[in-house]
Amino acid sequence: MPSLRDVANKANVPILSAYQVLSNTAPVEPQTRQAVIDAAEQLNYRLNVTIRDVADQAHVSIATVSYVLNNTVPVSAATRERVLDAVAALGYRPNITARNLKASETRMIGYAWHDVPPGQMNTVLDRFIYCMALAAESYGYHVLTFTQPTENVVQTYEELISINRVDGFVISNTGLNDERIRRLMEMGVPFAAFGRANDEWDFPYVDVDGRQGIKTAVEHLLAQGHRRIGVLAWPEGSLSGDARLEGYLDALETAGIKPEPDWIVRTQNAVHDGWQAAQRLMSARKPPTAVVCVSDMIAIGAMGYIESAGLRAGVDVAITGFDDLPLSEHLRPPLTSLRQPIELLARQVIDLLIAEIAQRRLPEHQILLAPTLIVRASSSQPLHC
């Protein structure tokens, strides 16, 4: 999310000049005014002075501004004056909600349950929630769960903050330009996310590098001699799904292989949908000898179709999945899959959140973790030409 400093830098003017133009509080030269207005439009920025802007204007850290405004840590008279001058110059109004939240700790972390369509499962998030709760308890916190409505998704978050029920939030199932993340950033409320939302937004998250993971799976299949490799991907618009598809394309491009259009089939995350998607995929003009699936649920369905068509999964058609569900190693044949480091991910999300609650953002607060390819019989045999 762009800041006042970003606008000032783009317009090549001091941050105070940018504020004066956007707030219309002081006369500014026409050339400067136009440069600031153009920069704000290009960045899609609306005036919203934050504590970070005050820190930039005063040439101090965000923590120092917080110390001055909350009177929690001794600060030199000169520094205090510089901070207060910046506050006055930029018309900053401290976020009362966030300050009240810090002043009256609940030792509770908010987390929303997400509705799962019939026939679909999300055992990865189930495991994440358990590990997250364990990590939170190690800091003396507990997790308060709530349901997230399908419309006005930020309403419950705002209500929990307004009544001081939680000290911060963990966000999951993130999407592009996620409305919840945007709103919590605007409110100055502590949170950390399992997943990304917008590369231009500076917020704490931990995510699994699905692009690299799928690339690794395709490279494994290439090493087994496969050249006709198909993919069963999620519908377009899923951040993690699109990243996983990019990993498939990356690996084939590196290998000098241009995939046939009908080697890419998109489907929902359910066994039945995976079965139907595999049927479409194997009806291609040049049917693939290997199939990469963006989830184990889809892979299980694909294996079911392969067997129903009189082919042998792992022999006639190699299959790989993603998530390494407990069921995967007990399938026949056992499924090759990418294992996500959920325990580590959950711990790091909580570490980031606790730092946010303490107003001490960690230097490394946007973390990508690599999944591990677990090779099993569904893909371990070399291709027989």
Image (cartoon, rainbow, N blue to C red):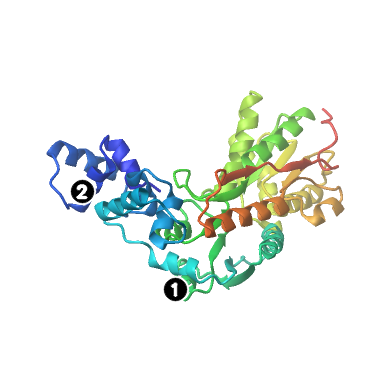
Q: Position of residue 249 (x, y in %)?
A: 60, 34
Q: Which residue is mark 2?
A: 20
Cα separation, mark 1 vs mark 2, equals 31 Å
Label 2 is placed on what type of residue?
Answer: Gln
Q: Say which of 279 and 159 sits in front.
A: 159
Q: Tell which circle, 1 or 2, labels the residue nearer the N-terminal end.
A: 2
Left or right: where 75 falls relative to 332: left
Q: Say which of 66 and 261 sits in front.
A: 66
Q: Looking at the figure, which quarter contains the C terminus?
A: top right
Left or right: where 102 falls relative to 345: left
Q: Say which of 285 and 306 sits in front.
A: 306
Task: Tell me what residue is drawn at x 22 percent, y 38 percent.
Answer: 35
Which secondary structure, mark 1? helix
- Whether residue 96 is visible to the viewer of this picture, yes or no, is yes
Task: Tell me what residue is drawn at x 66 percent, y 25 percent.
Answer: 255
Task: Tell me what residue is drawn at x 25 percent, y 45 percent.
Answer: 16
**Contact between labelled residues 2 and 1, with CB atoms less than 8 Å apart:** no
Which secondary structure, mark 2? helix
Q: Position of residue 382 (x, y in %)?
A: 84, 31
Left or right: where 100 falls relative to 275: left
Q: Dot 1, how many residues are within 10 Å of its Cα: few (below 14), some (14-19), or many (20+)?
A: some
Task: Tell me what residue is drawn at x 70 percent, y 47 percent.
Answer: 278
- Dividing the picture into quadrants, the one containing residue 108 is bottom right
User: Seen from this angle, which residue lies furthest top?
Assistant: 256
Q: Which residue is mark 1?
A: 162
Label 1 is placed on what type of residue?
Answer: Ser
User: Seen from this angle, which residue lies furthest front?
Assistant: 77
Q: Position of residue 216 (x, y in %)?
A: 70, 35
Residue 336 — which label?
none
